[in-house]
Amino acid sequence: MNKILIKKLSEEEIKNQGIESWPIWEKEVSRFPWTYCGKEECLIIEGDFMVETEDGNYFIKPGDFVTFPDGLSCVWDIKNPVRKYYNFP
């Protein structure tokens, strides 16, 4: 499966998964291609962006918990500077 999964987590789920102890990644407004080598999970803290894939475009915003599948090739189009917690399980 090569689809991006986006969901909302409760405060309890965020706490139970220890997400706020994950590293933080930051990126300015930009557009760039990316291919995932391994599955990534992340929780968007700030900013919004579009991820363009063969399956369609995904608009991602603060509060979204996103799972990017291993092997996904996409283009990130960051509209507002992004901060996210991230993890490679």
Image: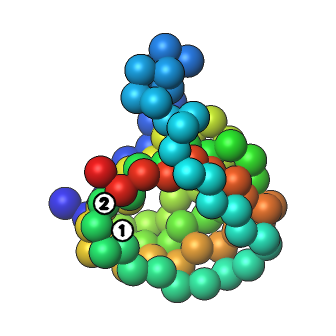
- The x, y position of residue 32, in whole percent, is 60, 84
Looking at this rendering, what residue extends furthest in the left direction?
A: 1
Quarter residue 70 falls in: bottom left
Label disc, if present, on residue 24 of the rendered structure: none
**Residue 10 seen from this side:** no
Q: Position of residue 66 (x, y in %)?
A: 46, 48
Residue 68 vertical placement versus 13 (above, below): below
Rendering quarter of residue 73: bottom left
Q: Residue at x 67, y 81 (%)?
A: 31
Q: Position of residue 22 (x, y in %)?
A: 52, 44
Give the alpha-carbon distance from disc 1 to disc 2, as whole Å. 17 Å
Circle 2: element type = loop
Crowding near the residue tagged with mark 2, few <14, some 14–19, many ≥20 C-alpha atoms within 10 Å:
some
**Amino acid identity at mark 2:** Lys
User: Mark 1 packing: few (<14 Cα in 10 Å), some, or many (20+)?
Assistant: few
Judged from the image, the secondary structure of the residue bearing numbered disc 1 is loop
Residue topped by disc 2: 39
The three-letter amino acid code for the residue at tag 1 is Asp
Relative to residue 62, is residue 38 drawn left or right? left
Residue designated by label 1: 55
Q: Which is nearer the eye, 14 or 48?
A: 14
